[in-house]
Amino acid sequence: MDRNEIKTLLPHREPMLLVDEIFEDADGVAHGRYTVRGDEWFLQGHFPGNPVVPGVIQCEIMGQACAILLGKQLEGKTAYYTGLDRVKFRQMVRPGDTIEVSASLTRSKPPFYFAHARATVGGKLCCEGDLSFAITEGR
């Protein structure tokens, strides 16, 4: 899926749409990508002269990538974070980096869904954690 197709699944829009492309493989793993351009709003003050993608934004990128795993359950609905557990940051993400996310569902008890996600840059782990979501009616 490209950004336009992602918009049919997610309610996010610029500047909060943080996935450029995504697909789900045959094993049920979501693979998403986002290239940090350098002009994003969250880099303006984090940090002047030394821009680094904030950890909370890395978690948001992973969360948006997880949404493809929820697929049809999201039609006309919204997934909201209910938790972040065991999140670790391993290396900085900077302008020009392409963040690659892999995510898989670990458990579900509708309307709650649980996933594990990993984000890498250049094959090196930058962030990983367990994420949980609740799907609610409406957008």
Image (cartoon, helix red, strand yellow):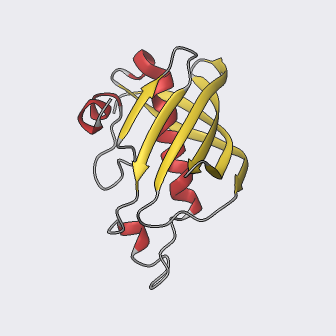
Name of the residue lying farthest toward the bottom: 49
Q: In which quarter of the image is the N terminus?
A: top left
What's the residue at 32%, 69% (across, down)?
A: 39
How many labels sit on residues? 0
- Compared across the picture, whether 45 is left or right of 125 comes to left
Q: Residue at x 65, y 18 (%)?
A: 109
Query: Residue 135 location in percent, x, y?
Result: 50, 27
Closer to the camera, 34 or 80? 34
- Residue in front for this viewpoint, 124 or 3: 124
Residue that sits furthest to the right in the current view: 86
Task: List x then y, in percent, for residue 112.
Answer: 61, 25
Q: Quadrant of the C terminus?
A: top left
Residue at the image position 23 percent from the left and 35 percent from the top: 4
124 vs 11: above or below:
below
Residue 43 x/y as whole percent? 42, 71
Looking at the image, residue 20 lies above or below residue 8: below
Relative to 118, is 76 on the left or the right?
A: left
Q: Is residue 104 shown left or right of residue 19?
A: right
Q: Measured from the top left, where is residue 78 in percent x and y? A: 42, 32
Residue furthest left in the image? 4
Quadrant of res 138: top left
- Residue 84, quarter of the rendered image: top right
Which residue shows up at 62% across the image and 38% down it? 117
